Amino acid sequence: MDYILQGLKEGILLLFKLDKELYRIIFLSVAVSSTATALSSFLAIPIGVYLGIKRFRLKGLFSRILYTFMSIPSVVVGLLVAISLSRRGPLGSLQLLYTPTAMIIAQTILVFPLALGLVYNLSKNRGKEIEKIGLTLGARRFDVIILIVRELKIYLFINVITVFSRAISEVGAVMIVGGNIKGHTRVITTSIAMFNSMGSYSRAIALGLVLLLISFLINSIIYSYNKED
């Protein structure tokens, strides 16, 4: 028990001392996950709203497939991206493997189904009435999508925050495509795993505390908006 308390104390001290290595890891994690969240949300919001209000055959089957991909294992995505970016892969000439760009690509692919599923489900359940009002006022399909996005912007924001939470807490995909290279592709989750295996518990605990703080802030934002609803 003493070594746990000692590790906690040393971890907190490292954060207050502004340890360069730790903060480089934290900033890269936030940058990679924020970029992946922005890219996936930019694509998922209009597509999800459109599919949510559109009537088409096999919509039930599409929903089941989409909800399945929402929980796709991160290591599978990481493996597919790594193969694609490897020297013998179709995108090997870009030389992106083991770079932050590869990590962004992997996380974007990983969280896109989640972003799409959340928006699709929201639009399907709450977009119908807004669509009717828009069509009654003579709005075109594109205008209806814009109207739904505006009316549901709070809920869409909560979805984006949820997607970011998924992105920053995953470890499999970024470990495979990033390689956990010091000063280059180390993020919070991969570093925690590495520091734990090395016995550097103070650094692992420090990063764990940061991840818990981020999770707390995310859940606080979601709770505050849900409370207002």
Image: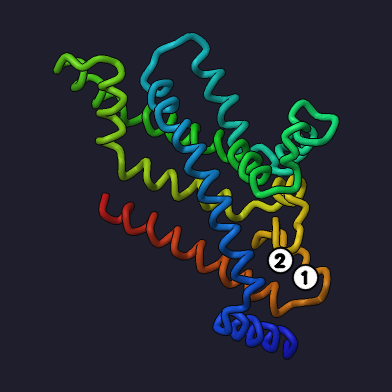
In the rendered image, which quarter is residue 28 located in?
bottom right
Quadrant in the picture for residue 180: bottom right
What is the crowding at mark 1: few (fewer than 14 residues within 10 Å), some, or many (at least 20)?
some
What residue is rendered at 78% in x and 65% in y? Answer: 194
Q: Which residue is mark 1?
A: 196
In x, y percent, where is residue 161?
Answer: 44, 50
- Judged from this view, the residue extending furthest toward the left is 137
What number is the disc on residue 192?
A: 2
Identify whether 117 is placed above or below 29.
above
Badge 1 marks a residue whose secondary structure is helix
Amino acid carrying mark 1 in the image:
Asn
- Image position of 107 (left or right of 82): left
- Amino acid, disc 2: Ile
Q: Position of residue 92 (x, y in %)?
A: 78, 32
Q: Residues within 10 Å of mark 2 (few under 14, many from 20)?
A: many
Give 226 or 190, whichever is nearer the viewer: 190
Please state if 63 lies on the left or on the right of 225 as rendered.
right
Quadrant of the image containing the N terminus: bottom right
Between residue 163 and residue 65, name the one nearer to us. 163
Query: Is residue 144 positioned above or below 30 on the image?
Result: above
Asked if the residue at tag 1 contacts the one at tag 2, i.e. Cβ–Cβ closer than 8 Å, the answer is yes
